[in-house]
């Protein structure tokens, strides 16, 4: 094992801790229903309550499912269909009726967001696209008029990465010029109402277009050389961060740098056709586990540091009636019999396992339990290298870097060597020093 591998293994050994058994406020899942074998809604509600998932996104409105989620404390995103948009846009009374039937009728189920339409701007239907914002405005006005919990519901719409004309390097992220007029008005509405811009980043599809081993590692949050954005001088260590920062840059170039982003979908298929590179169980497990660990670290992205973007995994179950390649029916985290497709670390009370590689035996570290150590970088190691190592370590499963994030107990001073020095294995484990 080379010195860099020892360095990373030591950081990981020092940072790994028991995963929280409580729900993760940033973690959601998509519940698609293009299937004929889904378990009953009450069974799904019990399954969700046994996990760390705190949010569920529906593509429409399913009254039985919404009722089943009452009392679970799991919030829902519900959808107004593309077919609903014309009436919602032209008739405020229709928006009030829609809200009454699909939100007010379920007072015991928390609904956080109404997504108006799905991927409307990418359909190429100019008429429908022009009606999207009026539909969103009418629903917002109806929710405010209803008062109570409804008044706090955010109104948004979901987009794919196809709304961007350029996404690499991330600093050059920009929306398609022919969408700018619509997006300018929509994002202005989102910012005014404190609603999020919802996007579907899929590193899997990025790998499909560039199926090299180094790209796979970059997409799976695995060790890699990173990719330098020559404009921002930021070295990105994974595709997820790069895609989100491209969206962040595009929003900034549009004039709305402070608009929040929500990941409405992301995932990796566990099987696919022979032509679908990388669609297998091993990669799906790696992507999901490493993504969740990255979110739990609270590192954020380079342009959105110190917090995790709310992220909805795709998907809770396979949708066996979906057309297209095998991968389209192979994103489910659970089977219809409620057993997991693979261990994604979502079960409440699950724990993470520390790396099997022992840390190097140097100085006074021999035979010292890692639970009583912190790290000190060696002289001569530059901050850029340390930051790469720290970012990689904080993205791994079971790592909690919360104390070195803004507001954390060890955030100040915010320098890379101090961040390494101050991050113990467990709270109170501050007894021994170990030089990297």
Image (cartoon, rainbow, N blue to C red):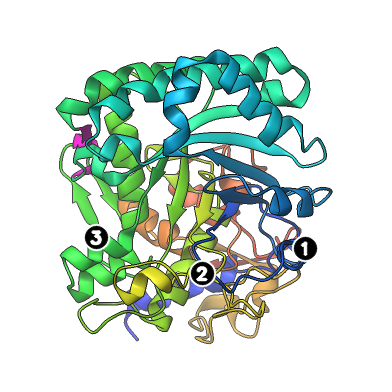
The residue segment tinted magenta is 169-175
Which residue shows up at 30% across the image and 34% down it?
121
| Picture quadrant of residue 207 | bottom left
Residue tagged by mark 3? 206
| Picture quadrant of residue 278 | bottom left
User: Residue 398 placed where, x, y %?
Assistant: 60, 67
- Pointer 1 or 3: first along the chain: 1
Q: Is residue 173 magenta?
A: yes
User: Residue 303 placed where, x, y %?
Assistant: 37, 37
For label 2, the crowd category at 10 Å Cα-Cα, with few meaning under 14, some 14 to 19 and many 20 or more, is many
Helix, strand or loop at label 2? It is helix
Task: Say above or below: 222 vs 238.
Answer: below
Q: Nearer the viewer, residue 83 or 302?
A: 83
- Pointer 2 or 1: first along the chain: 1
* Separation of residues labelled 2 and 1 (CA atoms): 26 Å
Quadrant in the picture for the C terminus = bottom left
Residue tagged by mark 2? 289
User: Residue 13 placed where, x, y %?
Assistant: 56, 74
For label 3, the crowd category at 10 Å Cα-Cα, with few meaning under 14, some 14 to 19 and many 20 or more, is some
* Separation of residues labelled 2 and 3 (CA atoms): 19 Å
- Pointer 2 or 3: first along the chain: 3
């Amino acid at each position: 094992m080379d010195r860099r591998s020892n360095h990373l293994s030591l950081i990981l050994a020092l940072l790994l801790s028991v995963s929280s058994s409580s729900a993760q406020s940033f973690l959601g899942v998509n519940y698609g229903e293009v299937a004929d074998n889904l378990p009953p809604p009450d069974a799904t509600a019990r399954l969700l309550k046994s996990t760390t998932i705190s949010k569920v996104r529906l593509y429409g409105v399913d009254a039985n499912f919404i009722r089943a989620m009452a009392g679970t404390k799991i919030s829902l995103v519900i959808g107004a269909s593309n077919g609903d948009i014309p009436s919602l846009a032209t008739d405020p009374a229709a928006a009030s009726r829609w809200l009454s039937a699909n939100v007010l009728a379920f007072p015991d189920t928390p609904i956080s967001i109404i997504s108006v339409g799905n991927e409307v701007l990418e359909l190429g239907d100019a008429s429908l696209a022009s009606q999207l914002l009026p539909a969103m405005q009418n629903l917002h006005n109806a929710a405010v008029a209803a008062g109570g919990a409804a008044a706090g519901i955010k109104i948004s719409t979901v987009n794919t990465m196809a709304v961007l004309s350029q996404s690499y390097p991330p600093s050059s992220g920009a929306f398609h010029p022919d969408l700018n007029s619509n997006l300018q008005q929509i994002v202005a509405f989102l910012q005014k109402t404190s609603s999020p811009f919802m996007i579907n980043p899929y590193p899997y599809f990025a790998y499909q277009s560039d199926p090299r081993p180094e790209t796979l590692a970059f997409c799976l949050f695995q060790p890699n050389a990173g990719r330098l954005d020559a404009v921002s001088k930021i070295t990105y260590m994974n595709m997820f961060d790069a895609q989100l920062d491209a969206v962040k840059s595009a929003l900034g170039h549009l004039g709305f740098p402070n608009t929040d982003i929500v990941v409405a979908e992301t995932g990796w298929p566990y099987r696919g056709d022979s032509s679908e590179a990388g669609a297998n169980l091993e990669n799906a497990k790696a992507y999901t586990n490493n993504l969740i660990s990255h979110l739990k670290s609270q590192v954020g992205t380079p342009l959105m540091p110190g917090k995790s973007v709310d992220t909805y995994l795709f998907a809770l179950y396979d949708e066996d009636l979906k057309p297209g390649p095998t991968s389209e029916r192979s994103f489910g985290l659970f089977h219809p019999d409620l057993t997991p497709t693979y261990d994604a670390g979502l079960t409440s009370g699950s724990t993470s396992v520390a790396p099997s590689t022992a840390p190097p035996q140097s100085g006074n570290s021999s035979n010292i339990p890692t639970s009583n150590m912190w790290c000190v970088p060696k002289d001569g190691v530059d901050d850029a290298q340390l930051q790469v190592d720290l970012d990689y370590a904080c993205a791994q499963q079971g790592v909690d870097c919360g104390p070195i994030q803004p507001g954390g107990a060890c955030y100040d001073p915010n320098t890379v060597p101090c961040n390494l020095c101050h991050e113990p294995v467990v709270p109170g484990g501050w007894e021994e020093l170990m030089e990297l």
